[in-house]
Image (tube, rainbow, N blue to C red):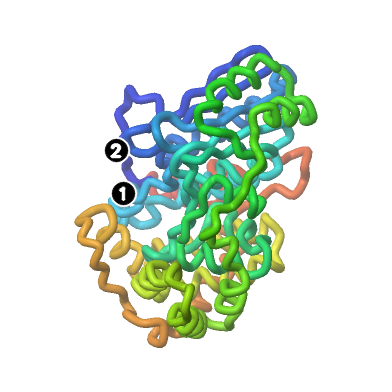
Amino acid sequence: MAQEVVNPEEQVVLGEEIDHVRLITLNRPRQLNVISSKVVSLLADFLEKWEKDDNTQLILIKGAGRAFSAGGDLRMFYDGRTSKDSCLEVVYRMYWLCHHIHTYKKTQVALVHGISMGGGASLMVPMKFSVVTEKTVFSTPEASIGFHTDCGFSYILSRLPSHLGEFLALTGARLNGKELVAAGMATHFVPFEKLPELEKRLISLNSGDENAVKSVIEEFSVDIQLDEDSVLNKLSIIDECFSKDTVVDIIKSFGLEASKDGNGWIGAILKGLKRSSPTGLKITLRSIREGRKQTLAECLAKEFRLTMNILRTTISADVYEGIRALTIDKDNAPKWDPPTCDEVDGSKVDLVFQPFKDNLELQIPENEKHRWEGKYEHSAYAALNATEIAK
């Protein structure tokens, strides 16, 4: 597995047991609580243990510092680029965990302030209750760096109204707390100053009864009213543009709308869209649209194939160039290969969507009685890795 820069003394995830309540704190505040392999393993261990524990009734999850979670640890992926499948294990474990978070058997509440992006938001949106504030910022910016919308978001975004999912996935446009509630990706809006008191009340409630938990949250939550300039007030334009068949046609249509009076909001978003990886955009658009007809398990299996093929540079090394430009050299001047959408070969895009051999697919357990089976350590990949190590 790729080596990540983690202080061995640092507790990257805290798990507290308070009578019938369990409190998870993502605890890498200086790194905006990015998700590393260690974070994934600890989350999986806690969640499995507590789902099986009759004494556990309510799970709370929050982020330390000024962020909930900024998503996957990009440096970990970049540092592993020269080693074959160095990040396969963490990818497998994360996507497998995503399925279990969506289908978790105990009541979960995410208390979300600050950044909640990409894979980090996969610890927010699927929860029974997700509480956001005026400081919450959501985004799925993966396509811009040559990656794709993952961690179950090809399932989540594809189920948003009309073509809002394509818009968010392709542009990485940000939503605030009010917009998340309006879009159905969060359940309650609570002013930031009230969040600590809400946490205390939920702990003192000491119950996972959904109605009781909802009642407590509603004591603190307020009704939302979208800002006049919210992108959610621009859905007719978004639907007109992002319903187009191809990325090229979407960009062309969005550009035409940008030239009309009153559409000044489009300019910065369109500029970012045009600067994004053409390969990442094409893969992402197809993934979201396939997601509309796929189950959660099918979406996660597809995302696993896409991620591994992208990290293996099956058709392009854009993801490493995107990470380099954004977080390593920070020059924000990526050189994409190929440089334009017209030059991205559709038949090559087909390659990254091809199913793996059955035993090499992400193994999502179908039998509810055995839902915690199918882990990485029981996969064909672990056996292959053990064989390689033994050589």
Q: Marks 1 and 2: in contact by CB < 8 Å?
A: yes
Where disc 2 sits, the SS reads loop
Where is residue 149 drawn, in percent x and y?
A: 51, 60
Q: Most extreme residue toward the bottom, as rendered?
A: 342
- In depth, the one of 188 and 105 nearer the eye is 188
Where disc 1 sits, the SS reads helix
Q: Relative to residue 241, is residue 161 drawn left or right?
A: right
Q: Please give the label number shown on residue 75.
A: 1
Marks 2/1: CA–CA distance? 9 Å
Q: Amino acid at mark 2?
A: Val
Where is residue 125 drawn, in percent x and y?
A: 61, 46
Residue bearing mark 2: 5
Number of residue marks = 2
Residue appearing at x 68%, y 29% in the figure: 217
Residue appearing at x 71%, y 59% in the figure: 295
Q: Residues within 10 Å of mark 1 (few under 14, many from 20)?
A: some
Q: Relative to residue 244, is residue 73 drawn left or right?
A: left
Residue appearing at x 31%, y 63% in the figure: 322
